[in-house]
Amino acid sequence: MSEKHASHPEAEGIIASTVTQAALTQDRSIDLSVDLAGVVLKNPVVVASGTFGFGREYGQFFDLSELGGICCKGLTLHPREGNPPPRIAETPMGMLNSVGLQNPGVDAFIAEELPFLRQHDVKIIANISGNTPEEYGVMCEKLSEAGVDMIEVNISCPNVKAGGLAYGTRPDLAAEVTREAKKHARVPVMVKLSPNVTDITEIAKAAADAGADALSLINTLRGMRIDVNTRRPILKMNTGGLSGPAVLPVAVRMVWEVANAVKLPILGMGGVSKGEDAAQLMLAGASAVAVGTALFADPRAPLKVRDGLAEIAAKQGLGAVRELTGGVRPW
Amino acid sequence: MPIQQICTVVSMERLDASTWWMVLEAGKMVERYGLRGGQFLHIKCGDGQLLRRPISVSITGQDEPEDLVTLIFEVRGEGTEWLSQRKIGDKLDVIGPLGNGFDVSKEGRYLLVGGGIGVPPLMEYGECLQWPHTAVLGFRTKDKAFPAIVSRFKEHCEETYLCTDDGTLGRHGFVDSQVREILVKENNFIAILACGPRPMLKSVAKVAAEFGVPCQVSMEERMACGVGACLGCAIQMKDGTMKHVCKDGPVFNAGEVDWDV
Ligand SMILES: Cc1cc2nc3c(=O)[nH]c(=O)nc-3n(C[C@H](O)[C@H](O)[C@H](O)COP(=O)(O)OP(=O)(O)OC[C@H]3O[C@@H](n4cnc5c(N)ncnc54)[C@H](O)[C@@H]3O)c2cc1C
Ligand SMILES: Cc1cc2nc3c(=O)[nH]c(=O)nc-3n(C[C@H](O)[C@H](O)[C@H](O)COP(=O)(O)O)c2cc1C
Ligand code: FES
């Protein structure tokens, strides 16, 4: 092998495919593990549903075992082709999407994707959407049987005309779906809340009272972008879900409100792209955080968030990152 | 397999007010990762743009100390504007190789059909294709038919036909009428490779189907991840399914694409 080939990849400008430079120098004395409703994550960084597929693509850029958990692309009982394109529009420090729950269906996930994910030392969180409460129940049965670590119940996807939005915006429907999921699941159930409501704590309380083990928030905020020349919305569906750095302050506020209203552990997300963003969500009350849209700019964003969190904890003299949770000192 | 690579700008040439010819040093992306023309790179265009911008690869070359990659792009908005302001020595954060490129594995005669900014992604095929090939290149007007690009086809193709929308150079009209004329005379092509705006691809696909010539088209769609994870870059197929430009494409069999949506 020539000298060139033997050199360290960083020296040639390749951003190394395994451990980050920061991780190598990271203070190993800080305990990064967190507990999310009995599911122990080795670090608090999870990847957000719909932004990471089933792990294969970003698994080319880093070892999936570096993550605390993986929320898989939203599953439905039957395969779905999703919405017509265009599905993506960039916005100031954010983006809109109207993918519309395109997925191969829960059975194909179990047969073809889960075995691959299971080769890695990482918690697998299946994300599900149903047209009826019964569908949620059937999916919970199948996924518990297949051995996922946790189920995230999406009651908030704003893209699907049937169901989606309604469950997440009405406490009685949110409670009904949560009860049905709990009845059939043999792993912890986390209910994912929509930010497109007047008072998110009402829905949070309804899900908690119905037996949810954890809550995750926020899903995308409904938005719209118009091409002024053609006077057409960029998205074929006209509106879509806003994500990315633009939504971080909304996420922090909502996590804080929910943490004050219910006792459940929270997976916080929305616009996280660095350690400080994640620390804000944890201080507001989240036990763990998910990184989504930031991946599109930088495939290694989740690892940077993890290392950034560790650095913040170290600077503040904490022994464990979990000590940040709920630590905000409101005026 | 794609990698994230820091590339260095080694040459930056302006072809006209809005078109740039950029050459990057791209590590060993060509030699080791197999980057080739017709694939694309997903480029971070400064901190002001959240999403990366996909740009097709025009020419690749294994080189020392690093492989060289030519990108030719048009300024459309803020991302490409930022890209056009790069200077020699600047670094770019790039993901690639992405996408498939054209399939030229079969022996036979090929017909390359490019339109506008869709011509450069065919350059490497024009220059290096090992099988005999003819090119049909369409431009809006004479000034857009950059000699630096057109000459590469002229040197290596059996024949290079030029068309302009306004008749200022070559044939007055669109590429599909030229393609039709060629196929009427000699229908012995094993495949058509086409890159350009969607309406052009649609009309070329129609002619190809009429004459029973297999046609590969390079498609565009708005992208987020660029690697197949977000399902953002969907295009509709005739059979009602969705495929993704970044992962299944950008090159598709024209017969599979639903042109009527
Ligand atoms: C596979 C592929 C290969 C491409 N190759 C080339 C090339 O070789 N040369 C070239 O000049 N252009 C190419 N394009 C188009 C180029 O990506 C867009 O012109 C560019 O993204 C516009 O970004 P902007 O910020 O300048 O414009 P803006 O209009 O500000 O972009 C806003 C958003 O729309 C997206 N967008 C706008 N137009 C397009 C488009 N046509 N396709 C995809 N996304 C778009 C952008 O990515 C961005 O997210 C290619 C596109 C694709 C999908
Ligand atoms: C392209 C895309 C697809 C998404 N798909 C899903 C989905 O299938 N199920 C779900 O619960 N959330 C989905 N989301 C929402 C994210 O999981 C997350 O809640 C949201 O994007 C906010 O986080 P972020 O700003 O870090 O991306 C999707 C988001 C994006 C950008
Ligand atoms: S851009 Fe994300 S799947 Fe193609």
Image (cartoon, coloured by chain):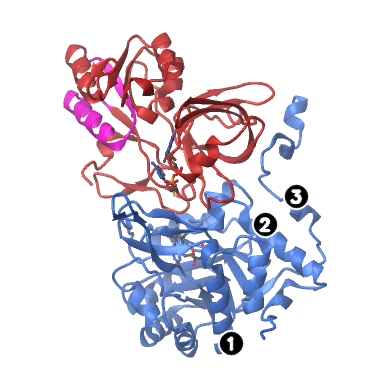
- Direction from residue A250 to residue B136 in the image, left or right: left
- Please state the horizontal and vertical placement of residue B191, each as a whole percent of the image: 30, 22
Of the image marks 3 and 2, the number of the one nearer the N terminus: 3
Q: Residues within 10 Å of mark 2 (few under 14, many from 20)?
A: many
- Which residue appears at 53% of the width and 54% of the height? A55
- Which residue appears at 29% of the width and 69% of the height? A161
Q: Residues within 10 Å of mark 1 (few under 14, many from 20)?
A: some
Tell me the amino acid under the disc marked 2. Lys
Chain drawn red in the picture: B
Q: Secondary structure at mark 2?
A: helix
Say whether marks 3 and 1 touch (CB < 8 Å).
Answer: no
Say if residue A74 shows up in the picture.
no
Label 1 marks a residue whose chain is A
**What's the magenta region?**
B187-214
Say if residue A31 shows up in the picture.
yes
Tell me the amino acid under the disc marked 1. Asn
- Please state the horizontal and vertical placement of residue A280, each as a whole percent of the image: 65, 72
Q: Secondary structure at mark 1?
A: helix
- A100 inside magenta stretch: no
- B208 inside magenta stretch: yes
Mark linked to residue A260: 1
Label 2 marks a residue whose chain is A
Q: Look at mark 2 in the image and give the residue it sits on.
A: A304
- Please state the horizontal and vertical placement of residue B143, each as a whole percent of the image: 37, 21
Q: Look at mark 3 in the image and give the residue it sits on.
A: A21
- Direction from residue B232 to residue A307 in the image, left or right: right
Tell me the amino acid under the disc marked 3. Gln
Pick the residue in front: B123 or A141: B123
Q: Residue furthest bottom?
A: A209
Q: Colour of chain A?
A: blue
